[in-house]
Image: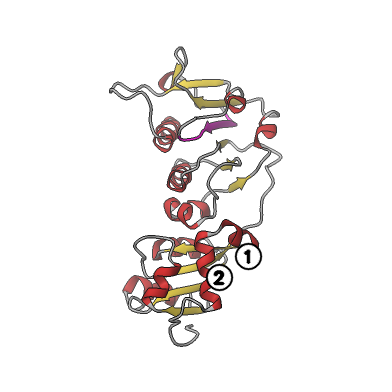
Amino acid sequence: MSDGNPIRSRQNARVRHWHALAGSARARQESGQTLLDGAHLIAAALDAGQPVEHLLLEETRAAQPEIAAICQRAAHLPCTMLAEAVFRHISPVEHPTGILAVLRTPAPQPLPAQFAPVTVVLEAIQDPGNLGTLLRTAAAAGVDHVHCTPGCARVWSPKVLRAAMGAHFCLPQLTENAHVHDWLADFDGAILATTLATGARSLWQTDLSTRPLVWLFGNEGAGLSPALAARATHPLTIPMPGRMESLNVAAAAAVCLFEMARRAAP
C-alpha cells in the first residue's frame, strides 16, 4: 500500500537512509537491511519467504505490468513512490529498473559442526559481479554450503545480490566467516583447488564422487593464499587447448562445479 504522494527531495530522512543502504556496508550492517533491485530478484525473495520489508517505486514506472504484479503480490507491505530523480539517487545500478525493495538481512551464521556433502569456500573474491556469479553458479550446480572469507565483497551488498539473481535464497547455508581456515583443519575429506602448477592432475581425471567434498576458489588476481592452498588434498588443472593460460575465477568455478554435476547426473 502506497504511503502518500511521491517523495521529491533527496534530503528526506528515509531517502538518505535508503541511499546509504545502496552504497555503505556500514549502513547495511548497522541497520540489518539491504536493497534488492528489480522485479525478478524481488520475486525470488518473495517466493523464498524472505523478510522483504518495504517496496520503493519510481513514479513513472509503477504501472508497468511486471512491477504492478510485484505490488499486487506484496500488497501487505508498505510502499513508497519516488520521483524519478530521487529513485535514481537511491538506486545501486546505473540503469534503474523502477522498483527496489528493502530486505532484512540474516544474522551472521556460525560455521556448521558437520560438513555438507558439497561445500565451496571463496577466498578474497573482491569483485561483486564475480562473487554474485559464483554464488549463482554454486546454487545452480547443487552446492550445499558456501563460505566466504574476509576480503570477499560483502555477500549482502546490492551489487552481489543483483549478480547472484536469487542464489542467496537457494543455498542452504551462506556465511561470511573469519575462521574458515581453522574450520578446514578438522576436515579429513577431499579438498579440491585449481592451480597453474605443472604436474597437477587434470580435472577430467580427478575423482569428484567422494562426499563430503570441499572446493576452494581464490582471489581474481592472486588466487588462493599459500595457507589455504596448502589445505588442498587434490590440486588440479582445467585443460585448456586454446592459447590462454588461465580463466576468470567465476568461469573456472563453473567448469569445475558443472563437471561434478555432470558426473553425478543419473
Residue at the location (54% across, 31% down)? 216
10 Å crowding of disc 1: few (<14), some (14-19), many (20+): few
| Element class at badge 2 | helix
Q: Nearer the viewer, residue 14 or 264?
A: 14
Residue 135 highlighted magenta (yes or no): no
Which label is found at residue 89? none
Establish if 251 lies above or below 23. above
Establish if 222 lies above or below 162. above
Q: Nearer the viewer, residue 176 or 24?
A: 24
At label 2, the amino acid type is His
Q: Magenta stretch: give its range.
A: 211-220
Residue at the location (49% across, 65% down)? 46
Say how many tags the image has.
2
2 and 1 marks in contact (CB < 8 Å): yes
| Element class at badge 1 | helix
At label 1, the amino acid type is Ser
Q: Nearer the viewer, residue 92 or 162?
A: 92
Which label is found at residue 31? 1
Q: CA distance from mark 2 to mark 1?
A: 9 Å
Whether residue 105 is visible, yes or no, is: no
Residue 48 image position (x, y, % from top left): 52, 60
Residue 263 image position (x, y, % from top left): 43, 29
Establish if 107 lies above or below 115. below
Residue beneath disc 2: 17
- Residue found at the very far left of the displayed protein: 242
10 Å crowding of disc 2: few (<14), some (14-19), many (20+): some
